[in-house]
Image (cartoon, grey):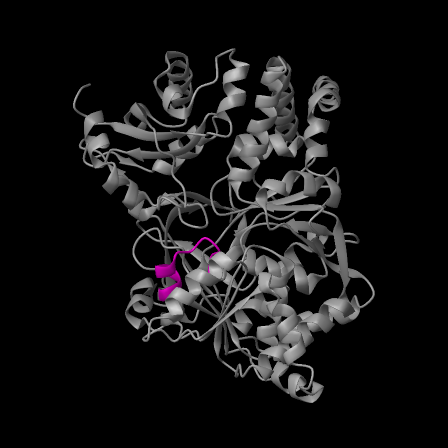
Amino acid sequence: MPTDDREYAANIPVMIRKAWEDRADRTVLRYTDDDDAWHDLSGAEAQALVNAVAKGFIARGVQPADAVSIMARTRYEWSIVDLALWSVSALPVPIYDTSSASQIDWITSDSEVSTIVVETAHHAKLARSVAADSESPLTHVLVMDEGCIDDLIAAGREVPDAELNRRVELAGHDDVATIIYTSGTTGRPKGVELTHYNYVRHTVGIQQELGPVLLSEGASTVLFMTLAHSLARLVEVVLLASGTVIGYCPDSKKLVPLLGTFKPTLLLAVPRVFEKVYNSAEQKAAAGGKVKIFRWAAKQSIEYSKAQGTPRGPSPMLRAQHAVAYRLVLSKIVDVLGGNARWAISGSAPLGDRLGHFYGGLGLHVMEGYGLTEVNAASHVNRPDVSKIGTVGKVLPGMEARVADDGEIMMRGEMLFRGYHRNPTATQDAMSDGWFATGDIGTIDEEGFLTITGRKKEIIVTAGGKNVAPAVLEDRLRAYPLVDQCVVVGDGKPFIAALVTLDAEALPGWLKGKELPEMTPAEAAAHPVVREHMDRAVSRANKAVSRAESIRKYEILLEDFTVDNGYLTPSLKVKRTQVLKDFADRIEDLYLTR
């Protein structure tokens, strides 16, 4: 807790109310209609809408500390409902919009949710199937697409302002603000309890460290990461409290055109998005017979970015080559990103040096970060003025980090969660003398920059006793345009191998660039030219490790890993345990012959 409580707002809605009062006549939120045209809400308009919906929840009987779930894509109504619930001192519990009925059942039962706000008729059908169970606490299903926002506003018209203002002030620093359920790569998701102080303290620290990114005149971003994820949720709160203009993109397929019309100054994405932009640009160049020019330009971008980090800077020759590359190729990618993007924050997985420097050469400063739900999503991030590509930056204010003797990253501080909901045993197991055991392994250099090298539970020990962190190989192999997912295997085996899936979206352009006929992913997996190029991709990935750690054999799977088939979490992390279990026979086949 702070020694001086006056430094921090009393709770989340009080903090955001103040930000919107300061921007009463300026745009704070933007959303699109069916024609993808942008519509703006000023601070005063957004606050009035939140207040009206909050009164509706009061009228509907939502009490302080009641848990209410939100299940929707990333649309502006998500934030309105979120803030409305906080404004009545309720406890929003997010649910991924891709969740199944059983997942909805578990989360609503564990957190005792009686009301859920969903987006679509499909979501409503799932939720109502859960509510039909007599043992479920779920009784009310409100549907955005069926006008529940207007219904709440109408229901709350008679609720006096004084009652809402009283509710806004009720929650204090120690009160739980939300329960966020981990996406669960193994076992049932655990509910992480985060307090109002976890958010208001974190917001102040992030604003302090990322001021030029968040607080500069005209700062804006398109939010498309699912708000059920802890990182997107933290980002939502920080952006709202900073006055950074948020544009909402519910449909990721529309992201590129919406970036073009919104023109954000800040990009927030997972590494896979940055990889997709690069790969699609390369495939487009290949289809037009200009792949050599693209790769030359990409090399200039990378070399230019690297040189900018040296005392002497880029040489006159490199500056001239970069200028040509920018004019011919790189400027087109800048335009795809909207033309105004200067900053980018990447989290959830390693980005890698190559992409970090590639975008750096475009004039986009990509700041990698790191964190877990249990430390309120972000414990580390590179700064606008002090960054090291390849690291996830230094620890944020209010947090401490150290590396245990076995390499595990341990953390403690003011953003640390209160505990797992109704699970004291799991909470105790995750802690050691006040330090939270992250499960990740890494190193901290003499300047305090953290580098993540893998997951502790995912370390592979070969039959020869070699410890291998699979993330290094997986990240490099996924960087190849044709690869969608990769799982490195070899625990207890004589050598390292890999399961690979093909990127169905990138495949047509890749085939065209190689002057190959159209084919399905299954046909491509067996094609000798595809195998030849995959061999090269594996060889390039192997250059990052020793021979004992290198991939000796691989198998191209005919089935991709998706959220729907259970091999990806909603935050797009591979469920390694499930993959290893379901493809055990395929893995064994890799070791039958040498």
Which residue is at the far right? 25
Relative height, residue 379 to residue 151 (above, below): above
Q: Quadrant of residue 167?
A: bottom right
- Please say if 460 is above or below 377: above
Specify whether residue 99 is painted magenta.
Answer: yes
Q: Nearer the viewer, residue 300 or 36?
A: 36
Regarding residue 277, the answer to whether it shows in the image is: yes
| Residue 335 coordinates in the image, percent (x, y) | 72, 33
Residue 52 placed where, x, y %?
68, 76
Question: Is 500 placed left or right of 301 in the picture?
Answer: left
Along the horizontal axis of the image, is 526 left or right of 228? left
Which residue occupies 42% across, 61% down? Answer: 126
Residue 500, image x, y percentages: 36, 30
**Magenta region, residue range:** 95-105
> Is residue 466 shown left or right of residue 352?
left
Q: Is residue 303 above or below residue 559?
A: above
Which part of the image, by quadrant, shows the C terminus?
top left
Q: How many marks?
A: 0
Give yes or no for residue 302 being in the magenta stretch: no
Is 364 drawn above or below residue 87 in the view shown?
above
Residue drawn at (32%, 51%) of the image: 405
Q: Position of residue 270 (x, y in %)?
A: 53, 44
Residue 9 visible in the current orientation: no
